[in-house]
Image (tube, rainbow, N blue to C red):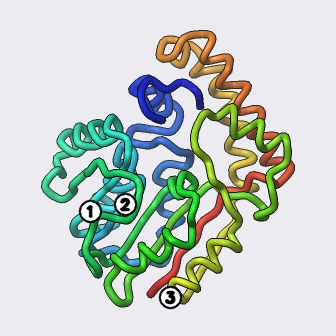
């Protein structure tokens, strides 16, 4: 979305997205999606890295409801890290989590540093999925787990003109790929027990509900946060996104695997 101040996520956008998706979240589905991504995975006592942690919503869920041990969240946006630190203090769990602003590039951790990697709708901002999966494998311990959701596409062909227009309207760097590309990248990086889940149908319906919220109960709150013009533009962007979801070109999904 194009309501940024500095960087890709400004304070105005953070407050707006939290109004839509819940405290600590910059992408849809909240704790329900996190729990589904983690289905069948025991996080008890694990040292976990959250890549693209945003405002910390997933880290807080991992600690408070999945009994994770120590969580490190990283993001390239300083303002979202500030918000994550604020919420960690508010929830009284700052001693169990650590949030870091990092630069794009290889993960700044030693080999075998973590038991698990989690990510919620952040890998789409990273173009080279193969290098990303290799680096994830590097920082995981033997037997380590990766579990993630992401915004994806139905295939890896050039995007349609409509998809290009939608991505441009979002105002963010978006490098979406298919579930198949993730599967192949995971396998090439040494992962096995690869599980994939397509979430297109869920978000087709969820995004429609979000439009109803944006034009109904949340309208005034959104206008107060970002102004009437940006509120109208946001609805237009959502409508473009729904069209891509209906065509099947935009396909959110989940994957998990083990080294």
SS category of the residue bearing label 1: strand
Q: Quadrant of the N terminus?
A: top right
Residue 190 bears which disc, if any?
3
Looking at the image, which residue is at 48% across and 62% down? Answer: 35
Looking at the image, which residue is at 61% across and 33% down? Answer: 171
Residue 71 bears which disc, if any?
1
Residue 219 horizontal side relative to residue 82, left or right? right
Q: Are marks 2 and 1 in contact (CB under 8 Å)?
A: yes
> From where the camera sits, is residue 32 visible?
no
Residue 55 horizontal side relative to residue 230, left or right? left
Looking at the image, which residue is at 23% across and 45% down? Answer: 88
The residue labelled by disc 2 is 50
Q: Residue furthest left?
A: 95
SS category of the residue bearing label 3: loop
Looking at the image, which residue is at 28% across and 61% down? Answer: 63
**Is 205 placed above or below 44 here?**
above
Residue 61 horizontal side relative to residue 240, left or right? left
Residue 53 horizontal side relative to residue 94, left or right? right
- Where residue 167 appears, as percent x and y from the top left, is 69, 40
- Closest to the observer, 218 or 145: 145
The residue carrying pointer 3 sits among few (fewer than 14), some (14 to 19) or many (20 or more) residues within 10 Å by Cα, namely some
Q: Quadrant of the C terminus?
A: bottom left
CA–CA distance in space, label 2 to label 3: 20 Å
Q: N-terminal of the two: label 2 or label 3?
A: 2
**Is 41 placed above or below 29 here?**
below
């Amino acid at each position: 979305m194009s309501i940024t101040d500095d960087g890709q996520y400004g304070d105005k956008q953070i407050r707006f997205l939290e109004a839509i998706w819940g405290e600590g979240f910059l992408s849809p589905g909240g704790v329900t999606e996190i729990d589904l991504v983690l289905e069948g995975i025991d996080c008890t006592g694990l040292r976990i890295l959250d890549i693209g942690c945003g405002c910390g919503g997933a880290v807080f869920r991992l600690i408070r409801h999945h009994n994770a041990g120590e969580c490190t969240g990283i993001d390239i946006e300083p303002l979202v890290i500030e918000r994550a630190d604020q919420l960690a203090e508010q929830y009284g769990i700052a001693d169990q989590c650590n949030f870091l602003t990092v630069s794009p590039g290889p993960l700044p951790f030693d080999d075998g540093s973590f038991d698990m990697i989690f990510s919620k709708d952040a890998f789409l901002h990273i173009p080279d999925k193969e290098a990303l999966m290799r680096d994830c494998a590097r920082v995981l311990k033997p037997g380590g787990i990766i579990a993630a959701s992401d915004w994806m596409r139905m295939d890896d062909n050039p995007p349609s003109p409509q998809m290009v227009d939608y991505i441009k309207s979002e105002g963010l760097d978006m490098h979406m790929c298919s579930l198949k590309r993730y599967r192949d990248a995971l396998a090439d990086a040494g992962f096995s027990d690869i599980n994939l889940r397509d979430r297109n149908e869920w978000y087709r319906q969820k995004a429609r509900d979000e439009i109803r919220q944006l034009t109904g109960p949340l309208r005034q709150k959104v206008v107060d946060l970002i102004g009437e013009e940006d509120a109208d533009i946001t609805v237009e962007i959502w409508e473009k996104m729904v069209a891509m979801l209906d065509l099947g070109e935009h396909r959110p999904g989940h994957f998990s695997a083990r080294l």
